[in-house]
């Protein structure tokens, strides 16, 4: 191809070539300007997208923590519901528990039989259990016994056990890193001996 003639170059400068897009013709310079504007808008869109992405990540972190907090609260509430559903065991003196277990050890005895035997039997074990329950609960002693048979029971701690637990709690509170749990037992032995000698 030969060189462009001077006239042709002047004509291009005076009237740049036109491209047809759809029904409208645009010059090469207009096309370049449009590309530059589109590139500038794309960069602005990119910056906005990065900003929105950063904000979205912050929102995700915040919402994730909210979900974790709600899950912890849900677990705590479910534990409370489970605890509330669980029947409360009745605390009974050792002698009453011994009577219950004695009557359960007999063949063919159910909870109702145990209640009737403790309530009506002239056996020493039943008489002692009745007296203790009546002294502790008054006229409601039968309801307490029935609740214990239905919902379960635990043995009441003796004075010595309560004293041991109290001293152990005090020692642990004062000296939390103490590994020697026999300190409470030693103190109990001393207090028990001291009380026996001075009463």
Image (cartoon, rainbow, N blue to C red):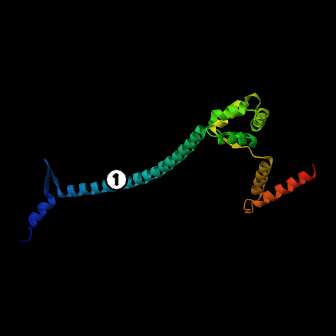
Furthest residue to the front? 107
Residue 10 place in picture, x, y as percent: 12, 63
How many numbered circles are shown?
A: 1
Q: Is residue 188 left or right of residue 87?
A: right
Furthest residue to the right? 198
Q: Is residue 8 above or below residue 198?
A: below
Q: Is residue 34 left or right of residue 23?
A: right
Residue 133 place in picture, x, y as percent: 76, 35
Residue 195 place in picture, x, y as percent: 89, 51
Furthest residue to the bottom? 2
- Name the one closer to the observer, 53 or 23: 53
Q: What residue do we see at 11% from left, 60% from top?
A: 11
Q: Residues within 10 Å of mark 1 (few under 14, many from 20)?
A: few
Q: Where, by quadrant of the figure, is residue 120 drawn?
A: top right
Q: Check disc 1 and report the residue beneath it.
A: 45
Helix, strand or loop at disc 1? helix
Looking at the rendered image, the quarter that the N terminus falls into is bottom left
Furthest residue to the top? 139
Q: What residue do we see at 68% from left, 31% from top?
A: 116
Q: Is residue 105 left or right of residue 122?
A: left
Q: Where, by quadrant of the figure, is residue 130 drawn?
A: top right
- Name the one closer to the observer, 137 or 126: 126
- Name the one closer to the observer, 19 or 112: 112
Q: Is residue 41 above or below residue 144?
A: below
Q: Where, by quadrant of the figure, is residue 104 drawn?
A: top right
Q: What residue do we see at 54% from left, 45% from top?
A: 75
- Name the one closer to the observer, 122 or 18: 122
Residue 123 place in picture, x, y as percent: 75, 36
Q: Is residue 69 left or right of residue 9?
A: right
């Amino acid at each position: 191809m030969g060189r462009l003639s001077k006239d042709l170059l002047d004509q291009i400068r005076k009237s740049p070539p036109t491209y047809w897009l759809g029904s409208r013709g645009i010059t090469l310079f207009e096309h370049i300007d449009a590309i530059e504007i589109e590139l500038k808008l794309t960069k602005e869109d990119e910056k906005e997208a990065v900003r929105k992405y950063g904000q979205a990540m912050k929102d995700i972190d915040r919402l994730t923590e909210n979900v974790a907090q709600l899950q912890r609260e849900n677990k705590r509430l479910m534990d409370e519901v489970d605890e509330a559903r669980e029947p409360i065991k009745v605390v009974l003196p050792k002698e009453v528990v011994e009577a219950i277990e004695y009557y359960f050890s007999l063949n063919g005895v159910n909870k109702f039989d145990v209640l009737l035997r403790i309530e009506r039997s002239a056996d020493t074990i039943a008489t002692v259990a009745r007296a203790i329950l009546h002294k502790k609960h008054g006229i409601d002693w039968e309801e307490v016994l029935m609740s214990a048979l239905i919902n379960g029971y635990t043995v009441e701690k003796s004075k010595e056990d309560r004293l041991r637990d109290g001293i152990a709690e005090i020692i642990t509170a004062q000296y939390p890193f103490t590994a020697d749990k026999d300190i409470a037992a030693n103190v109990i032995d001393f207090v028990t001996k001291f009380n026996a000698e001075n009463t």
